[in-house]
Amino acid sequence: DTGVSQNPRHKITKRGQNVTFRCDPISEHNRLYWYRQTLGQGPEFLTYFQNEAQLEKSRLLSDRFSAERPKGSFSTLEIQRTEQGDSAMYLCASSLDLAGGYNEQFFGPGTRLTVL
Amino acid sequence: DAKTTQPPSMDCAEGRAANLPCNHSTISGNEYVYWYRQIHSQGPQYIIHGLKNNETNEMASLIITEDRKSSTLILPHATLRDTAVYYCIVPRSNFGNEKLTFGTGTRLTIIP
């Protein structure tokens, strides 16, 4: 257990439905990241936050995806109008950003989304 | 990010040293090499990182060639719990404190 939790662990939904995932980072960590991982591939970066500010979004994050981190604590990732291609593992990670050094990312167990 | 090349799979006998190679011939002078691993059904886990000197921690050793174009991750006494996919990453920034770009990694299987 890394201290990063994600809920739900599994989500099955029908195409066209909206889904929301939650990530609770390690409490003192100011950076939070979202990645997506499909079968047989490594995780792909989606977006990251520094406190409550969303600093970078991947082109993979289409308009149907939105992420928030209110008050710089937990984060939510919402997918609207889900498509079968959205089926994947969604991973959250957090780190404590200290200037002048590398800050390892601690990953949660992921939320596995299946779109039928 | 600098491109990395890793063998898709490797086997290692339990108790032996596992040596995982990574080629990063386009690495630039201030880019670090990072290693993460992902055990089945878990999120990735940080292992080690280095710039030019060899590094060692409680999990592994990292040997970086003098020209920095390749590196080797060494698990000195592999156990069954070391079976995982190992990713060699060279992020764009000095410390990689933004995104990590994972490739497909090396699937290491420890044989009893």
Image (cartoon, rainbow, N blue to C red):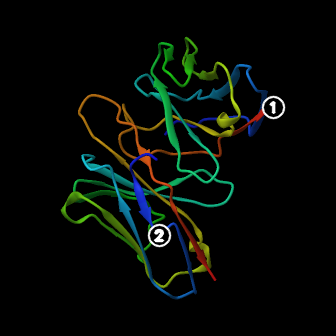
Labels 1 and 2 touching (C-beta < 8 A): no
Q: Horizontal and vertical percent for residue A22?
A: 38, 67
Where disc 1 sits, the SS reads: loop
Q: Do the residues at discs 1 and 2 belong to one chain?
A: no
Q: Can you tell which quarter of the image residue A83 is in?
A: bottom right
* Chain for disc number 1: B
Q: Amino acid at mark 2?
A: Pro
Where disc 2 sits, the SS reads: loop
Q: Horizontal and vertical percent for residue A87?
A: 59, 71
The quarter in which the C terminus of chain A is drawn is: bottom right
Q: How many marks?
A: 2
- Please indicate whether residue B98 sits to the left or right of residue B8 in the image: left
Say above or below: A27 vs B48.
Answer: below
Q: Horizontal and vertical percent for residue A104?
A: 39, 37
In depth, the one of A91 and B59 nearer the eye is B59
Q: Residue at x 29, y 41 (%)?
A: A96
| Residue named by callout 1 | B112
Say above or below: A52 vs A19.
Answer: above
| Res A53 label | none
| Residue named by callout 2 | A8
Q: Residue at x 51, y 13 (%)?
A: B54
Q: Residue at x 35, y 31 (%)?
A: A102
The residues bearing labels 1 and 2 have C-alpha atoms spaced at a distance of: 35 Å
In depth, the one of B110 and B25 nearer the eye is B110
Q: Residue at x 64, y 28 (%)?
A: B23
- Please indicate whether residue B8 sits to the left or right of residue A29 in the image: right
Q: Amino acid at mark 1?
A: Pro
